[in-house]
Image (cartoon, rainbow, N blue to C red):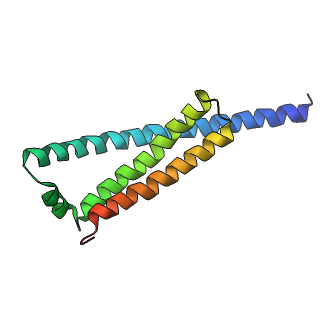
Amino acid sequence: MSATARAAVGGAEARDAVAQARRWYWQRMSAMVLAVCVVLHLGGMVWAARGGLSAAEILSRTQGNGLFAAFYAVFVLACAVHVPIGLMAIAREWWRWPPAAALWFARGVTAALVVLGLRAVWGVYAPGV
């Protein structure tokens, strides 16, 4: 193998290592956000259930509530960062997918989570929908 070819392989390995380190960082950061969101979400659910709120009463409190929409939008976006990174690792390590296929799979999952998640937030937030 020529020196140029070895340098190209070494550069690709370095880029892959940097990309993996970035994914590791973003998955850990999103996990921290998700931990807070899950605790607040479960606390709210327990509070609503213990308070005897019906689904209609809960919906009436969420419609038009910007704080609700912002909280769940952050929750959705944290999921859209966290989940695809893990699925991409599973696709590469367990399913033996090539890196490019795993990346495109993760991008598709990201798009689906963002679109469907934010649509759900809008559906519960939007007044009169």
Instruction: Identify the residue shown where x is 68% and y is 42%.
Output: 100
> Would residue 122 be found to the left or right of residue 90 on screen?
left
72 over 12 or under it: above or below = below
Return the residue found at the far left.
51
Position of 27 compared to 74: left or right? right
Q: Quarter of the image holding residue 64?
A: bottom left
User: Residue 72: where, in percent of width, then height?
Assistant: 31, 54
Describe residue 106's horizontal placement relative to residue 81 as left or right.
right
- The quarter of the image holding the C terminus is bottom left
Residue 125, x across and y down, in percent: 27, 64
Q: Residue at x 12, y 46 (%)?
A: 49
Residue extending furthest toward the right: 2
Between residue 13 and residue 103, name the one nearer to us: 103
Q: Nearer the viewer, residue 27 or 44?
A: 44
Residue 74, horizontal then vertical, whole percent: 36, 53
Quarter in which the N terminus is drawn: top right
Query: Camera-side residue: 32 or 78?
Result: 78
Q: Residue at x 45, y 55 (%)?
A: 114
When the figure is inspected, residue 63 is found, relative to residue 21, above or below; the finding is: below
Give the number of callouts: 0
